[in-house]
Image: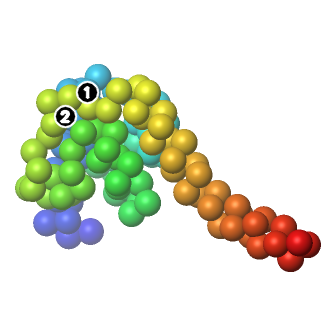
Amino acid sequence: MTINGDKRRKAFADRVEKRMRATRQDAYTVAKATGAHHNRVREWARGSRWPSVAHLGPLAVALGVSVDWLLTGGGQQPKASVASPREQNALAIARELYELSPQIADLARRAKEIG
């Protein structure tokens, strides 16, 4: 990793950590909202690892920021409030349904074939 890359990752980690504190969330809460393991969330907040593309959107939602702000510090500034636990649960359910959608589509196709 280049020096600039290290600086970018550290700045990203600082934003993640800052928003976790501001929204009073720990690694377990953010993990539940993003679908990542809590150790991964800690790595993001320490700057030892970047999140995957699949985790960026849910991470931004959980922290109440835009993906742009999370990655660069630019764009939409952090919201004063963050998603409620109920909204976070709804997001988790939506993510699970999205992940199941290929299986659901396959089951629907197979059911149609039986007809």
Q: Residue at x 8, y 55 (%)?
A: 74
The quadrant of the image that shows the N terminus is bottom left
Q: Which mark is residue 7?
A: none
How does the figure colour the protein chain or chains?
rainbow
The quarter holding residue 15 reads: top left
What amino acid type should be assigned to the residue bearing mark 1?
Answer: Thr
Residue identifier under label 2: 18
74 sits to left or right of 49: left
The location of residue 59, given as percent across then percent down, is 35, 46
Residue identifier under label 1: 23
Q: Residue furthest top?
A: 24
> Does the residue at mark 2 contact the one at mark 1 (Cβ under 8 Å)?
no
Q: Residue at x 69, y 67 (%)?
A: 105
Q: Residue furthest front?
A: 115
The quadrant of the image that shows the C terminus is bottom right
75 sits to left or right of 103: left
Q: Residue at x 59, y 57 (%)?
A: 99
Q: Nearer the viewer, mark 2 or mark 1?
A: 1
Q: Residue furthest right?
A: 114
Q: Nearer the viewer, residue 38 or 112?
A: 112
The location of residue 110, given as percent across then percent down, is 83, 71
The location of residue 72, given as percent across then percent down, is 14, 58
Q: Secondary structure at mark 1?
A: loop
Q: Nearer the viewer, residue 10 or 114?
A: 114
What amino acid type should be assigned to the residue bearing mark 2?
Answer: Lys
Q: Residue at x 54, y 42 (%)?
A: 93
Q: Against 86, is 7 above or below?
A: below
84 sits to left or right of 99: left
Q: Is residue 10 visible?
A: no
100 sits to left or right of 38: right
